[in-house]
Image: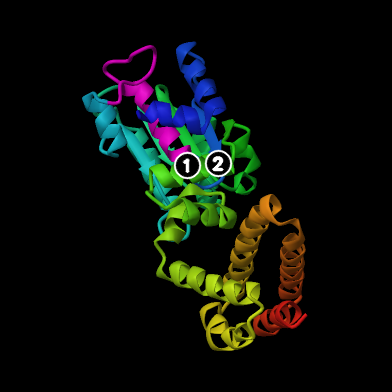
């Protein structure tokens, strides 16, 4: 599958919008790509940039294989400047250096493109410096800012950009992408999309040793609960509380448990309607658990209460 075909499936509306803009010569000098992590903003920015430099456009689309297209996809083209946070922020020195670079002639052409990743991480000085630049942009220049927090971008910067909205991936598309591209097994992919709607984050989580251990821990706890085995209570004390230490991890524990309960309940709906009541009861306990966790009840107390209400009910 080509990059274009993948992007067309991933973000059909954005793909069509940008392709039409190029085809009809209605290009803006500044774009703001906004959407969740993993929705294709960075890949779309590279593909759109290739339009301007491609040596063998086909049907008004980049060929993806010429020297310029390959160098742009490899982040090696001298007239495509990329800016990313230096630590926690994009600093004013980075924007000033960008202005110096853009004041020079292009190395290979008159065109220059700037790609700014995580634009919401510009500090006040760097954002104001960029704003001055956008007010009087040079000729043959395009800038694409990418963000997953558009509300953190200065309104004056937003007003000078054409905002392109990237839709969150559907669960089905995200599962399919995790299977095909990241080679993640279907069952794990389903669990991951219940934890995040970001492809990038899902892949990152899947490679985390803690995630794999925590998943196995929840599966074992769930197995005890489902069998109404008193071992579930001891398991909370000896294993569960040692794996899920901070509040974020503890939320994840309940999210994982809810996923496995829903999966089994959906199976029971097709087989045994009487058994469904048990899983509905367990889901109610998990919902209450989340509320208690937000009210700062200790994780161990909450997990023990779930166990008591389910196993000894």
Left or right: where 84 falls relative to 283: left
How many numbered markers are drawn?
2
Q: Residue at x 59, y 32 (%)?
A: 163
Q: CA distance from mark 1 to mark 2?
A: 6 Å
Q: Considering only vertical position in the picture, is 8 above or below 282? A: above
Q: Residue at x 64, y 75 (%)?
A: 225
Mark 1 = which residue? 176
What segment carries the magenta color? 40-64
Residue 140 percent across, percent down from the top left: 40, 22
Checking the image for residue 172, the label placed there is 2
Tag 1 near tag 2, CB within 8 Å:
yes
> Label 2's element?
helix
Q: Quadrant of the N terminus?
A: top left
Q: Considering only vertical position in the picture, is 127 above or below 12? A: below
> Label 1's element?
helix
Q: How is the image coloured?
A: rainbow
Q: Is residue 110 visible to the viewer in this orientation of the structure?
A: no
């Amino acid at each position: 599958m080509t990059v274009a075909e993948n992007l067309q499936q991933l973000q059909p509306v954005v793909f069509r919008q940008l392709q039409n803009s190029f085809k009809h010569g209605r290009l803006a000098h500044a774009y703001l790509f906004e959407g969740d992590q993993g929705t294709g903003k960075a890949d779309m920015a590279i593909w759109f940039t290739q339009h301007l430099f491609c040596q063998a456009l086909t049907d008004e689309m980049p060929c993806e294989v010429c020297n310029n297209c390959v160098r742009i996809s490899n982040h090696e083209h001298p007239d495509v400047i990329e800016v990313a946070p230096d630590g926690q922020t994009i600093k004013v020195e980075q924007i000033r250096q960008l202005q110096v670079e853009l004041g020079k002639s292009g190395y290979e052409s008159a065109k220059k493109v700037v790609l700014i990743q995580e634009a919401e991480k510009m500090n006040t000085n760097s954002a104001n410096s960029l704003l001055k630049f956008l007010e009087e942009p040079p000729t043959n220049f395009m800038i694409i800012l990418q963000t997953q927090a558009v509300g953190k971008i200065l309104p004056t910067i937003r007003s000078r950009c054409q905002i392109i909205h990237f839709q969150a991936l559907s669960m089905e598309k995200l599962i399919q992408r995790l299977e095909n591209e990241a080679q993640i097994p279907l069952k794990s992919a389903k669990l991951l999309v219940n934890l995040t709607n970001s492809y990038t984050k899902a892949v990152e989580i899947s490679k985390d040793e803690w995630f794999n251990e925590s998943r196995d821990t929840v599966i074992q706890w769930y197995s005890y609960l489902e069998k109404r085995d008193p071992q579930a209570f001891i398991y909370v004390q000896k294993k569960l509380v040692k794996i899920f230490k901070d509040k974020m991890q503890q939320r994840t524990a309940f999210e994982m448990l809810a996923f496995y309960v829903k999966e089994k309940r959906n199976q029971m709906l097709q087989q045994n309607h009487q058994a469904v009541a048990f899983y509905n009861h367990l889901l109610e306990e998990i919902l209450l658990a989340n509320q208690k966790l937000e009210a700062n009840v200790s994780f161990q107390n909450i997990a023990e209460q779930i166990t008591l209400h389910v196993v000894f009910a």
